[in-house]
């Protein structure tokens, strides 16, 4: 009989077989969790059945977490790791440091009798562990978060369950809310084909003993997970590509496939604050920057499904993931939660665009010792997630999100704190303000869009745009496609030159808006200023750690006279270039390995991204191509030691736009003066003076004077005096001087 055939049967109260005693090593990981650690440490050290050893790993906490665990456990039991260390890596380091204990070297631990919030000290007493019987004990690892507090009998209840099942390798407790201590968060967890984390619980479901049956589940949470040490080593611990979320589902799924049993012990209870999922502390172990928990969870869900699903089922899983992402993105947009819509898409793409990692992980997992079909009962039924999805969409229509209402990735909502927890009420009440403070990018876009709408209110609803450099646009997208494909073009006196490729881009954009070319042009012009600010904010993230400074720089870039003047005079090419230029600069730096350290190698993925953006920009403003050629030759001079590799990237970057935009691009080579033109008509409204060029002003109507932005030039000059980042400053100045030469 398969070890999974009794997945839902409760355990009988039979006499426990003779098993060796258990040696439990608790592993506590802390990361900015000082507000929860006193309860978590009291729960760990106050167990009725104490652990034999405990090791804490603090991952660069910025609060008092490291001091609290050191005072409670002792300095020799605390590891201090880097801030970006993932949960799985921290557990691995702590378990390796703890080692394997034998009955001869069991230590003394401290049992706390209380925590004094005034002196912030423990009142404790030492006690000696009881002797173990002769024989080899079973070694266990008990994994704990800094925001989970186990009840005094939690460990004893989990060990009672494993005493009744020699195949039990992983056991998890029942998780309740931190504030509402009767609210159920998890009693085992699974995953749907769409990647949704599935607990089988209703929203705000209260614990009334309705799920108190010991049973086999697909997974249990890492908060309170008890895992046999030999199984941990056999599985290799958590997957390092899952820095925080869904690592529990992946580990337990692999344990099932290896022939082990994963059980939930509902009599063992832990309170869990879910601090990371509720955005009560930053997630900075999932990349170079603070990540959104929704995006991290989505990326982890996609990865977990793709690396563990059966080969025959993989196409269906891929279809469900993509289709489910599109539907949820639409639901988030309709429900006015654009941040989560963006997280859905970026979480999916960040995993799918790295197929090598998925293939390597599938090879590492192999076929498994258990037929995957035997695990079918551990996953949600095919139609079980429909009701939950409808409820989530309805909740979004109500104007709230999980983060706003205190919800979590489990689909449950805390009913609110009481008593000692009242100090944390402010966290839930101002969760939305905290999210805005951490993500000023959408706020920046909204403010710039509002300014653009006010400035361009006369262009909205007034019919098709005309005047300035704008060509008279047809009212229907089919007419615009016809102009692109026709051999005769009625511009000026008419002629037969090749149609400019930007017509095809505008046609494709118009098709998204039911064929309205007028609306597409209006949207492109009006949104050029806020989009320019948003792309500048995104690009400066590696350069400026301060969000406020990045926001200021982005606003200054968005309101450059070149961008605002292009909006006023209908210079569509300049407007599009203002949006694309920051992205082009960033991808060019990555493609050529021109980072501030000066020793990084470029990548082909960045090269093709740079090529795509350069091609799109060239379709509107051809001048970017010779600029890219000159700057690319300068890079080759700097990279002359590796001329072959960088030469190929240079040829790909400058050659692809010519091939893609042919035969129009070939006409530019035969008439180089055409490089100085852009999309639209030549308005002939004047050019910039020498002072205007030095002050970053293009001249012409509706453009501010050169003196207005002279402060930015002075700031750029002052950057030359800095002692650090000289390579980046000089590279930026070289690009600016080349652009100034072309402008002259």
Image: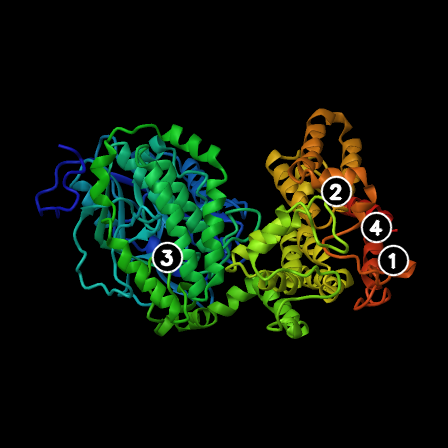
Left or right of 57, for residue 24: left
Q: Secondary structure at mark 1?
A: helix
Query: Which residue carries the number 4 mark?
Result: 720
Give the image location of residue 240, x and y in percent: 45, 38
Q: How is colour applied across the structure in the image?
A: rainbow
Q: In percent of the image, x 28 and y 56: which residue is there?
A: 386
Q: Which residue is mark 1?
A: 694
Circle 4 or circle 1, nearest the eye: 1
Q: How many marks?
A: 4
From the viewer's perspective, is residue 19 above or below residue 744?
Answer: above
- Name which residue lies at 76% across and 56% down: 492
CA gap between label 4 and label 3 equals 48 Å
Give the mark nearest the N terminus, 1 or 2: 2
Q: Nearer the viewer, mark 4 or mark 2?
A: 2
- Label 4 or label 1, whichever comes before in sequence order: 1
Q: Which callout, 3 or 2, points at the residue further toward the start of the chain?
A: 3
C-alpha span from label 4 to label 1: 17 Å
Q: Is residue 370 above or below residue 94?
A: above
Q: Is residue 5 left or right of residue 237?
A: left
**Label for residue 409?**
3
Which residue is at a point 24% across and 54% down the rendered structure image?
384
> Which residue is farthest right?
690
Q: Nearer the viewer, mark 1 or mark 2?
A: 2
Mark earlier in primary sequence (4, 3): 3
Name the residue: 22% across, 36% down: 373
Q: Earlier in the sequence, mark 1 or mark 3?
A: 3
Residue to which mark 2 is pinned? 625
Q: Nearer the viewer, residue 422 or 708?
A: 708
């Amino acid at each position: 009989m398969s070890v999974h055939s009794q997945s839902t049967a409760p355990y009988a109260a039979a006499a426990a077989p003779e098993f060796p005693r258990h040696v439990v090593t608790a592993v506590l990981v802390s990361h900015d969790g000082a507000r929860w650690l006193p309860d978590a440490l009291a729960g760990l050290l106050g167990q009725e059945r104490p652990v034999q050893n405990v090791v804490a790993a603090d991952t660069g906490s910025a609060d008092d977490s490291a001091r609290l665990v050191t005072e409670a456990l002792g300095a020799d039991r605390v590891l201090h790791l880097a801030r970006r260390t993932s949960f799985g890596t921290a557990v691995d380091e702590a378990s390796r440091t703890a080692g394997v204990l034998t009955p001869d070297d069991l230590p003394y631990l401290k049992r706390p009798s209380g925590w004094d919030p005034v002196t912030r000290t423990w009142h404790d007493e030492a006690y000696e562990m009881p002797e173990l019987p002769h024989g080899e004990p079973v070694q266990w690892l008990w994994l704990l978060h800094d925001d989970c507090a186990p009840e005094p009998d939690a460990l004893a209840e989990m060990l009672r369950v494993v005493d009744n099942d020699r195949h039990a390798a992983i056991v998890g407790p029942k998780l309740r809310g931190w504030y509402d201590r009767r609210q159920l968060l998890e009693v085992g967890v699974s995953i749907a084909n769409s990647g949704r984390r599935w607990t089988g619980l209703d929203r705000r479901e209260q614990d009334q003993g309705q799920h108190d049956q010991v049973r086999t589940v697909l997974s249990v949470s890492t908060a309170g997970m008890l895992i046999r040490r030999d199984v941990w080593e056999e599985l290799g611990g958590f997957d390092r590509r899952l820095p925080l979320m869904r690592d529990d589902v992946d580990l337990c799924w692999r344990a099932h496939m290896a022939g082990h049993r994963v059980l939930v012990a509902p009599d063992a209870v832990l309170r869990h604050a879910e601090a990371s999922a509720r955005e009560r502390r930053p997630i900075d172990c999932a990349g170079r920057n603070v990540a959104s928990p929704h995006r991290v969870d989505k990326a982890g869900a996609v990865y977990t499904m793709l690396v563990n699903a059966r080969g025959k089922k993989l196409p269906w899983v891929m279809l469900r993931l993509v289709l489910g992402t599109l539907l949820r993105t639409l639901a988030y947009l309709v429900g006015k939660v654009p941040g989560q819509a963006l997280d859905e898409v970026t979480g999916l793409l960040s995993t799918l665009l790295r197929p090598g990692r998925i293939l390597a992980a599938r090879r590492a997992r192999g076929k498994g010792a258990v037929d995957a079909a035997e695990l079918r009962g551990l996953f949600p039924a095919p139609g079980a997630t429909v009701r939950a999805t409808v409820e989530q969409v309805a909740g979004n229509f109500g104007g709230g999100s999980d983060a706003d209402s205190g919800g979590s990735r489990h689909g449950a909502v805390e009913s609110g704190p009481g008593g000692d927890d009242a100090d944390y009420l402010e966290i839930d009440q101002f969760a939305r303000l905290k999210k805005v403070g951490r993500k000023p990018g959408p706020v920046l876009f909204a403010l710039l869009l509002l300014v653009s709408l006010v400035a361009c209110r006369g262009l909205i609803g007034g019919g098709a745009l005309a005047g300035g450099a704008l060509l008279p646009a047809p009212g229907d997208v089919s007419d615009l496609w016809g102009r692109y494909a026709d051999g005769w073009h009625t511009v000026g006196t008419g002629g037969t030159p090749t149609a400019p490729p930007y017509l095809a881009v505008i046609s494709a954009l118009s098709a998204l808006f039911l064929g309205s070319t007028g609306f597409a042009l209006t949207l492109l012009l009006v949104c050029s200023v806020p989009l320019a600010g948003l792309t500048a904010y995104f690009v400066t993230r590696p350069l400026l750690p301060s969000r406020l400074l990045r926001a200021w720089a982005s606003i200054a870039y968005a309101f450059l006279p070149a961008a605002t003047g292009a909006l006023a005079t209908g210079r569509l090419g300049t407007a599009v270039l203002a949006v694309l230029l920051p992205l082009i600069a960033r991808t060019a730096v990555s493609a050529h390995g021109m980072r501030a350290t000066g020793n990084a190698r470029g990548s082909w993925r960045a090269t093709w991204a740079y090529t795509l953006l350069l091609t799109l920009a060239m379709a509107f403003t051809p001048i970017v191509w010779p600029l890219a050629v000159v700057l690319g030759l300068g890079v080759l001079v700097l990279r002359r030691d590796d001329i072959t590799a960088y030469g190929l990237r240079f040829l790909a970057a400058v050659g692809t736009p010519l091939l893609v935009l042919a035969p129009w691009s070939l006409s530019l080579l035969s008439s180089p003066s055409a490089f100085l033109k852009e999309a639209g008509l030549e308005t002939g409204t004047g050019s910039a003076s020498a002072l205007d060029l030095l002050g970053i002003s293009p001249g012409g109507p509706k453009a501010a004077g050169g003196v207005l932005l002279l402060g930015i030039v002075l700031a750029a000059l002052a950057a030359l005096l800095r002692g650090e980042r000289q390579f980046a400053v000089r590279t930026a100045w070289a690009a600016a001087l080349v652009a100034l030469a072309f402008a002259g």
